[in-house]
Amino acid sequence: MRPLIAGNWKMHGSLRASVALAESVRAGADDLAAELLVCPPFPYIQAVAMSLLGQPVAVGAQDCHPAVQGAHTGDVAAPMLRDCGATHVILGHSERRAGHGETDVVVKAKGAAAIAAGLTPVICVGETLAQREAGQAEAVVRAQVAGSLPDGFAEAGGIVAYEPVWAIGTGKTPTEADIAAIHAALRQAVGPDTRLLYGGSVKPANAAAILALPHVDGALVGGASLIAEDFLAIARAAG
Ligand code: 13P
């Protein structure tokens, strides 16, 4: 499976900085073994997609609403994202599960909307530190996968990202054995064809070791994706 290195830009940057970052990523994107995806904030998606038109860097969003359209003030529908040039959408990120009360049921509905709009969903799962310390990491992740993946997910090329909540933005990562164990469980749950990304403090220094683990088909990168050289170094580490 061709690895995918995805950048989640979260709520960072400006219009000018986002286009500049996209162009710097594009400049290093030729001849990589990995596919690249960047996910800017909503207002910058179209400009970034325009600057990457025809280039080997895909553009995604960080969320969508389950409805096609309607009276949902402040929300964005999946077809609107497609219209603006996005091909992917991150769903169920822990920052949305925790900060916006998104449940598995909501994430599943968003995933179905994404697929219906022709977007590839990147559905995030991951345990909290308390859950890991209680020995529940694998059970939590299995339950999230069972509850959050919509029908037709595998057929639509859906992607799952394992992001332990306690590893996000902290500089901490699980041991290689712990990542491998969760990814083996995920592989069993989703089947052979679904890409499994690891996310949580992926940096150029740890990327090669993480990306070499079995059933790790790429990375979902936060902080390091805001620096083109770091993001590209991670991509090169994918082989
Ligand atoms: P960091 O790479 O900053 O830890 O963020 C990971 C993440 O949340 C990507 O979605």
Image (spheres, helix red, strand yellow):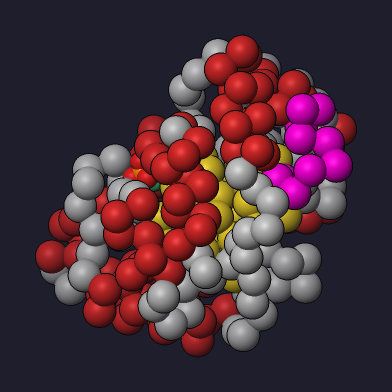
Identify the residue shown where x is 24% and y is 58%. Answer: 173
At 40% from the left and 55% from the top, the residue drawn is: 199
Q: Quadrant of residue 25?
A: top right
* Vertical relation: 144 (above or below) 187: above
> What's drawn in magenta, residue-wise?
49-58
47 or 237: nearer the viewer = 237
Which quarter of the image is occupied by the N terminus?
A: bottom right
The image shows residue 92 at horizontal and vertical percentages of 51, 48
Q: Nearer the viewer, residue 233 or 92?
A: 233
Q: Quadrant of residue 62?
A: top right
> Per the image, is 21 magenta?
no
* Left or right of residue 18: residue 176: left
Reply above or below: 47 against 187. Answer: above
Residue 56 pos. (x, y %): 75, 49
Asked whether the viewer can see residue 188, the reply is yes
Where ligand 1 lies, by image quadrant?
top left
Q: Is residue 15 above or below residue 56?
A: above
